[in-house]
Image: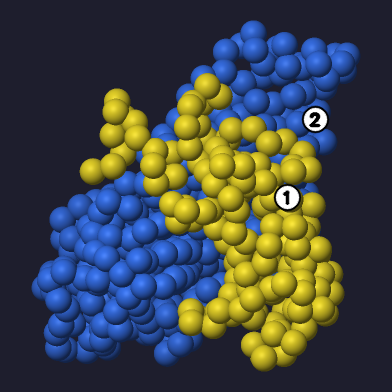
Chain colours: A blue, B yellow
Amino acid sequence: MYNQTEIIKDTSELGADGELVINMGPQHPATHGVLHLVVTLNGETIKKIEPHLGYIHRSIEKMCESLTYRQFIYVTSRMDYLSSHINNLGCALLIEKGIQIEVPDRAKYIRVILSELTRIASHELWLGAMAMDLGAFTPFFYAFREREMITDIMEDTCGARLTMNYIVPGGLMYDLHPDFQKKVKAFITQFKSKVTEYEDLVTNNIIFQSRTKGVGILSAEDAISYGCTGPVARASGVSCDIRKIYPYEVYDKVEFDEVLETAGDSFARYMVRVKEMNQSIRIIEQLIDNIPEGDFVGKTKNVLKLPKGEFYTRVETARGEFGVYVVSEGGTTPHRIKFRSPGFSNLSVLNHIAVEGKIGDLMASMGTLDLVIPDIDR
Amino acid sequence: MTNEEIKEYIPALAPAATFDETGEWLNVIVSAEELKPLMSALRNGKMQMNYLFCLTCVDFKTHLNMVYHLSATTHRQSIVIKANLNREQPVIETVCDIWRTAEFLEREVFEMFGVHFTNHPDLRKLILEDDFKGYPLRKDFEDPINMIKL
C-alpha cells in the first residue's frame, strides 16, 4: 500500500533535520493484527504517529445493505471478535426496538450473563497480550488459563469458541446447555481465587508500574473531544458506562459500580479493566441463580421488516460504546447501516497521547487502548 | 432542555432550520452553509454539546445526507443535526476543530461518499488505497471484481 520510498519522500517535505520515519506494522508482533503505524521520530522522541488502516477492511456496512435483518447480526461477530455477543446484542436490540418485539425475561438474563462473560474473556486476553507487549510473558498463560474456561462455556452454549452467533431478534437461538450454571459457578470460584495472582504478578510489579505510570496521559476533556469511550475514557474520569446511563436488558436490576480512575495514564487504564472484571463477576453472581424459567425466544415473524425511519441503539462492549445506526426505507434490508465502533475513536487519540513521548512507551500507550483491528476497519 | 425549548433556541442560530420529531431524538435539518456556525454554538453555547458520538453520511440516490449525532456528558440529551448535500459536488465545512473525533470520521466519509470537507487539516483516504476509484458506500457503486453486494 505504502512503499518505503514514498514515505521517505514525504518526510523530506517536512524539512526537519534528524527526523527518522519508521514503519511499525502491518505485521509487527505488538500491534495484534494488521495495523500499520508510520512513526516519525527525532532520536527516541515520537514527533508524529499516522495510522494507516484498511488491511482487514471488508466493507461490512455495504455488505449489510444486502443482508436481511435476521442475517446482518452475524456479520457483527466478525467486527470486534472479542465482544461478539455484545455486538450481536446491540443489533438485536435495534430490531426489537424497531419492530417492538417482546423479549422473554429468561432471554434477557442469559444475554446479560453472556455479555459479562464476554467482557471478562476480552479483558483477560487484553491483560495477557498487554503484559506480553511490555516484555512479561508469564501473565499471558495465567490470563488464558481463566479465559479458557469461558471459551469452553461458550462452546457448550453456542457451538463456537470465538465468533459466537447465539442472539437472535426476540431472544436466543437455542436454550441453555444443562451444565451452564454449574460451569459458570465453577468459573467464578476459580476466577476469584486466581485474581490475586494478577495483582501479585502484574499490578504490584515495580517494572510494570514504572513503565505505565505517567505514560500516555489523556485528560478528561480530550477524551470526550476524541469520542473515547469505555475503559479508556473511564480511566480519565469520564463517566460513560452505557450500562449505567442508558440501561438495557436487566442492567437496571443488578448492582454494580462504574469503575472510574482519574490519572488518565496507561496504569489507570490497566486498573479500570482489572477492576471491571470483578464488577462483571458481581453481576453474574446476582443473575446466575435467578434465571427465570420460560421461553427463550419471543414470537417473531419469519420475515422481519423495520418500519420506515431511523433507529439507533448503543451497548457497552469491552472496548466502549458500540452504536448501530440504521436508516430503513421499510423493506427487509437496511437502506444504510453505520456501526459506531469504539476502537475507531479510541485509535484516533493515539497520536495525541503518544506524541512527545519515547518510542519505548508507545507500546504501553497503544496496548492500553485495547485496539482490535477488525473493529476499526470494519 | 426539552425539545420545545431547543426548537425555540435553534432558529436564532440557523434561521432556515427545519425540525423532524418522528424518530427517537429531535432532528434538525439545516443547509450546508449554516451548519458550521450552528455546530460551534451548540458546542460552546448554553447547550454544551461536547460529545459527537456518530458522524456519517447516507446516500438517498437523489442527494447525500450528512448526519451528526450530538450529546453532552453533563445533561445527556441527544440531538441529531442533518444537512443535505448535492450529489455531484458535495461540499461541507469540517467540524474537526470543534470535536477532534471528527477528523478520522470525516476522512472515512470523504473516501466512502466523496464528500469534500473544507478546512479539514488532513483530508486523505484512511481505509482504502490511495489509487482507489469511486465511492463504495454510494448506492450506484459497482465493483465487478470484488463483489460486496450479495
Q: For residue B46, what is the image quadrant?
A: bottom right
> Measured from the top left, where is residue B2 in percent x and y?
67, 90
- Say left or right for A182 vs B44: left
Instruction: Please give the name of the residue rendered at 33% of the width and 53% of the height, measured from the top-left corner.
Output: A65
The circle drawn on residue A120 is none
Circle 1 sits in a helix, a strand or a loop, which is it?
loop
In the image shown, does B124 or B117 lie closer to the viewer? Answer: B117
> Measured from the top left, where is residue B48 in percent x and y?
78, 74
Q: What quarter of the picture does the C terminus of chain A occupy? A: top left
Report if residue B142 is visible in the image. Answer: yes
Q: Nearer the viewer, mark 2 or mark 1?
A: 1
Q: For residue B5, what is the image quadrant?
A: bottom right
What residue is pinned by disc 1? B94
The local crowd at label 2, few if under 14, some if 14 to 19, many if 20 or more residues have their Cα within 10 Å, is many
> Measured from the top left, where is residue B13 in percent x and y?
81, 73
In the image shown, does A211 or A62 lie closer to the viewer? Answer: A62
Proximity of marks 2 and 1: CB atoms separated by less than 8 Å: no
The local crowd at label 1, few if under 14, some if 14 to 19, many if 20 or more residues have their Cα within 10 Å, is some
What residue is pinned by disc 2? A47
